[in-house]
Image (cartoon, rainbow, N blue to C red):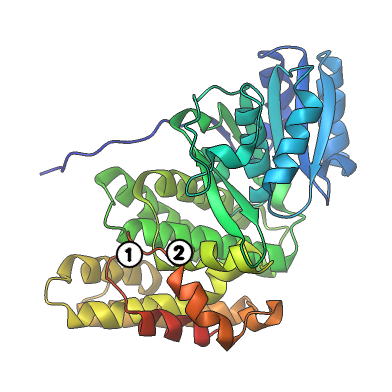
Amino acid sequence: MVVPFSFSRLPVIHFGPGKIDNLASIAAGYGQSALLVTGSASFIKSSQGEKVMNFLSEKGIRIRKVQVTGEPSPAVVDKAVTENRTSMPDVVIAIGGGSVMDAAKAISAMLPPGGNLRDYLEGVGTREHPGLKVPFIAVPTTAGTGSEATKNAVISEVGSNGFKRSLRHENFVPDVAIVDPLLTVTCSPEVTAASGMDCFTQLTEAFLSTKANPMTDALALKGIEAVVRSLPEAFRDGKNTDARTGMSFAALLSGICLANAGLGAVHGFSSAIGALFEVPHGIVCGTLMAKANEVNVRALRRDRSAGRALARYSEMGKIVLGKEDRTEDYYIDGFIDYLFRLTDELRLPSLGRFGVSKTDIEKICMNTDIKNNPVKLTTEELGEILESRI
């Protein structure tokens, strides 16, 4: 029996090597002016970027630019909206990693109403966004967050009273996602590792989520297969097109799964840590993933009603180890061992390198939301996860 479920809308997806060449024609369908949002290591400075700009120019599209550094804050979004609202663009285009896409998504959403982004953030503001936006095209240059397929933009303000919250609406899903794996081949091994583990965490947590459904299950398993096959190779050889394509596909699926099934303990930590420290989101996810799942499994094995979640860990273990005639525990333990080996192989740094210390554990745990985690973890268990990677 297939259980009832609901599923969020998706963008029109153009996937594959060379698909970036379609950007100008697609953008021209929305009008003759575009706001282009990029990162500090700007794609626009590359030969591929020059080609894209020439294509846009040939289509007669006027371009205004916004550059984003790091994870977007309310101030960054508000400034971009103020500077561009008097001459409203026909389309917003994001070319960059997850932070760039989140910034552009928020700018697209805030251009019609104007005002302060803070007022509409979950858990921060009190106003409900009407859902109007400027048409939005997302072009990822990393394989990680899957923001090209999600309905939320993650906004951060770092400090003692900081926050990491979402601007969210069903209408904020990008209108078009152009996923060209060739745009990721210049990512450093460090970026490949961090973004890839963010993707892997999203797929795993969505599959284990209490909100998982048959659609997200199918997509998550396919994405996990792609990560296991592609991430180590993409890390070792960034020019490997097959590995890059596999990771771009996995990241796209991870965004779809995130939007429809929610996430677990690792992403709960990420929001709490990201509000206090300038730690790249993918590093938080990657460095905590193995230990968090080890603690999850230990807690699940104490719970007599946890058969469903443990069976799912076993399914993921079969992807890693191959389907042999072994026990469920064999596959579960094998999956956890694989996560620890992968953490070492990708040389993921500890949180201590970014200033997180043992004295911060209590505050982080108090602000960690794990409502969709497959098992309830105690404060002590959450602290154990954190302490292992400080």
Percent x, y for residue 371?
33, 60
Residue 136 lies in quadrant: top right
The residue wearing badge 2 is 268
Residue 81's spot in the image, x, y percent? Answer: 73, 30
Q: Looking at the figure, which quarter contains the N terminus?
A: top left
Q: Disc 1 on helix, strand or loop?
A: loop
Work out whether residue 124 or residue 216 is closer to the camera in this orientation and state it. Answer: 124
Q: Residues within 10 Å of mark 2 (few under 14, many from 20)?
A: many
Up-down: is 270 above or below 20?
A: below
Does 306 sit above or below residue 67?
A: below
Mark 1–mark 2 CB contact (< 8 Å) = yes
| Quadrant that contains the C terminus | bottom right
> Residue 202 or 355: which is nearer the viewer?
355
Q: Position of residue 82 (x, y in %)?
A: 77, 29
Q: Image quarter for residue 223? A: bottom left
Residue type (three-letter) at the residue carrying disc 2: Gly
Observer-nearest of 374 and 184: 374
Label placed on residue 62 = none
Residue 50 vertical placement versus 272 (above, below): above
- Residue shown at 39% from the left, 63% from the top: 264
Classify mark 2: helix, strand or loop.
helix
Q: Is residue 338 visible?
A: no
